[in-house]
Image (cartoon, rainbow, N blue to C red):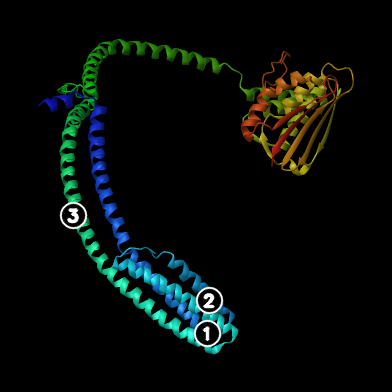
Amino acid sequence: MVSKISIKSMSLRKKMIMAFCLPTILLFLVNMMLYLGTTRVLNSLDVVYSSNNALNQLNTALESLQNATEGYLNTKTSDALEQYYIQEQEYSDMLVALDDNKDDNENRVMERNIRHMSQNYLELTNQAVESKRGGNVEKYKNIYEEATRTFSYIESSINSLNNKQFVNNSKSYGAMMAALQTIERLNIITLVIIGLANLAFVVLIASTIAGPLVRLAATADSVSKGDFDVPLPPVRSNDEVGVVTGAFNKMVISIKDYIAKLTESMEATRKLRENELIMENHVKDAELKYLQSQINPHFLFNTLNAGAQLAMMEGADRTSNYIQRVADFFRYNIKKNKDVVTLKEEIELVDIYIYIINVRFAGEIQFTKEIDESLLDIKIPSMILQPIVENSINYGLRNIEWAKKIKLSVYELGDYVCISVKDNGAGIEKETLDKILNGSFVSNFNKSDSNGVGLNNCIERLNIFYERDDVLDIISEGKDKGTETILYLPK
């Protein structure tokens, strides 16, 4: 009972730590102990037959040396001699591992004898080889026969020692395997016990966490469906779940109170909204009447065309042409202001604009064009070139005392179509030029005769249309040095 009460009073974090960390730590410690015991047994097993493996390798090396010696004595080739020296060195290296001790143990005595006989055998094989190289046939045959007898003694001794050690090692191996099986059974029993204990512990912890959460979830589901009269879950613990449950209960009560107050105010809100709708209808009706009172643009075009026809009938051809060009200019402004047009259409609008302006300026503006005709079909936003030309006239040419010149150029540069509007006017100082390019320049020029599309507007639309910020550049060497505006349009 005490433990159950103490668990309920714990925070959710501590419960989670207890549910996951303590069983894990316990399992880790037990498995570590079993692992260390098993590792010691396995390491002992590795050592059990190491002496047999060493003797087998020694016997194999001895046979290889004997074969290499016989091979050289039979062939007397350089390859056979080289093979002999390799096998001799390998066997000599293995002899170092034999224990040259003074122990009276039978196995140790046999190892010592094998070592001494092997050293004698190496001397005999070496003498036989040297005799063969010197051409002393009788001598090398006698030495080789003695070396062969020594080889038989060594091989017999190695096999005898190997059998004795195998018997001893088999007894040790059986004892170690029995110990390993005991550890394995102990490991299984321990894991089963710990697993059952952990399961009981986790169930206890989970019941203190999951039970309140299940009740809280059921209540929350009912509330989400609009049932605010559902019985609220009781608070039975002081952990985070208990805190959330208490806060949820307070929230449900607050929502019920809020709904009641909201219901009381809905009628007043509805009446207020009705009054607002009535006012909106009056405003829209006023706006409609205002729009109906505006001049229809088609009426303006028709009026200008009528004036052009009247001037033509009266023989005033220049006046008729002028009125017709003004009508074309405004028609382009109304129809194309938000469309994408061809470069050819934009240049035609510039021609119309220059004509109208020259009527006002008495032909003072000298307008020239240098255009690559193959580039006129590219698409650009409408109302781009005319505002740039208008800007050159208003800010560059209007107040100068020398000849007023504007040149429009269209040419190809790499992957770009370049459009240049260059004047010989007042020029722009560097500080003002920087403000124009970054959009912070504010003009004080009277735009009463402008079409309302400024240079900033052109720059912003170009940047948006081509999705880049380097479409337009303005070049001026300073005051009275003229200005060139260049558009770099991607093909």
Single out the mark in the foreground, 1 or 3.
1
Neighbourhood count class around disc 3 (C-alpha, 10 Å): few under 14, some 14–19, many 20 upward: few
Instruction: Kindly report the distance in space between the C-alpha atoms of the residues bearing marks 2 and 1.
Output: 12 Å
The amino acid beneath tag 1 is Leu
The residue at the point 36 percent across, 68 percent down is 111
> For residue 315, which quarter of the picture?
top right
Determine if residue 309 is in view: no
Neighbourhood count class around disc 2 (C-alpha, 10 Å): few under 14, some 14–19, many 20 upward: some
Single out the mark in the foreground, 2 or 1.
1
Per the image, the residue denoted by label 3 is 182
Per the image, the residue denoted by label 2 is 83
Q: Nearer the viewer, residue 121 or 204?
A: 121
Q: Nearer the viewer, residue 262 or 440?
A: 440
Neighbourhood count class around disc 1 (C-alpha, 10 Å): few under 14, some 14–19, many 20 upward: many
Disc number placed over residue 73 in the picture, else none: 1
Q: Is residue 39 above or below residue 140?
A: above
The amino acid beneath tag 3 is Thr
The amino acid beneath tag 2 is Gln
The residue at the point 37 percent across, 79 percent down is 153
Residue 92 screen position, x and y as percent? 47, 69
Question: SS class of the residue under badge 2?
Answer: helix
> For residue 454, which quarter of the picture?
top right
Q: Nearer the viewer, residue 154 or 85?
A: 154
Instruction: Kindly report the distance in space between the C-alpha atoms of the residues bearing marks 1 and 3.
Output: 58 Å
Query: Do tag 2 and tag 1 residues touch (Cβ < 8 Å)?
Result: no
Quarter of the rendering occupied by the N terminus: top left
Q: Is residue 445 above or below residue 461?
A: above
The residue at the point 75 percent across, 37 percent down is 418
Residue 83 screen position, x and y as percent? 53, 76
Q: Residue furthest bottom?
A: 138
The residue at the point 76 percent across, 41 percent down is 413
Mark 2 or 3, nearer chain start: 2
